[in-house]
Amino acid sequence: MKAVVFDIGNVLIRWDPYLAWLDDLGSRSAVTEFLTRVAFFDRNLRADGGETFADLAAELKNVEDQRRLNAYVERYAATVPDKIEGTWQLLYRLKEQGRQVHAITNWSTETWPVGVSAHPELGEVFDVTVVSGQEKLLKPQPEIFHRLCERAGLTPQDCTFVDDTLKNVEGARAVGMDAIHFSTPQAFEAALNERDLL
């Protein structure tokens, strides 16, 4: 196995979209109502696929809802406050041992630069990074895994992929990658050890 391919959100960086509107709406329950009303997670996935938040907000009928969703990009840094330190330690151990380290992330082309600004290592640590919004492809579509392999000069069989979303893990396996369903850094470390990758 030559390479470990990381998902980023909730594997390396905590993502909590509630934090974009908590100060505005005052409570998590109020934010939940807003997120539900605007179908935020469906719209966010569309942004991850290449659509803009301005266009997604324009679909909403309520002017205040439009304003809030439109402000998501400028508030985005608040949603990615913390690194998952244990996973970063494992990533650096893999690099020290000469493993290739890549990333495939479902991430909007508008918010990705904000995330990299908040956590500059994201722009430096990976050999190849495939960002869904830039590619207009989403995990678990097979094409996004193949694109990573093409750019990294690998076959799927060369890769172990890790993601916190099961359908993405299954998508990686479907194209021939080994894959780990992420839960905690400790469990991830055990899975890497089982594969003699550490």
Image (spheres, rainbow, N blue to C red):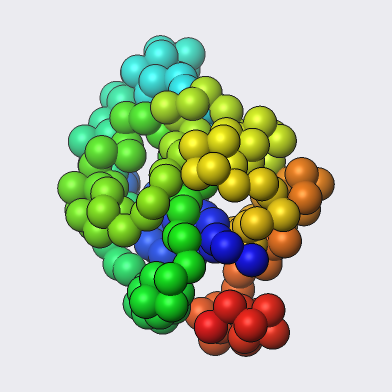
Percent from the top left, x then y, of residue 163? Answer: 59, 59
Image quarter of the N terminus: bottom right
**56 or 176: nearer the eye?**
176
Indicate whether 193 appears above or below 152.
below
- Extreme residue toward the right, this view: 174
On the rendered structure, is 146 left or right of 23? Answer: right
Residue 125 in sight in this render? yes
Percent from the top left, x then y, of residue 172? Answer: 71, 50
The residue sitting at 49% across, 37% down in the picture is 151
Percent from the top left, x then y, of residue 39? Answer: 56, 33
Indicate whether 65 appears above or below 139.
above
The answer to which quarter of the image holds residue 46 is top right
On the rendered structure, is 3 left or right of 92? Answer: right
The residue sitting at 66% across, 31% down in the picture is 143
The residue sitting at 47% across, 51% down in the picture is 103
On the rendered structure, is 40 left or right of 158? Answer: left
On the rendered structure, is 58 left or right of 117? Answer: right
The answer to which quarter of the image holds residue 180 is bottom right
Residue 37 in sight in this render? no
Total labels drawn: 0
**18 or 32: nearer the eye?**
18
The residue sitting at 46% across, 53% down in the picture is 102
**100 or 134: nearer the eye?**
100
Percent from the top left, x then y, of residue 12? Answer: 42, 64
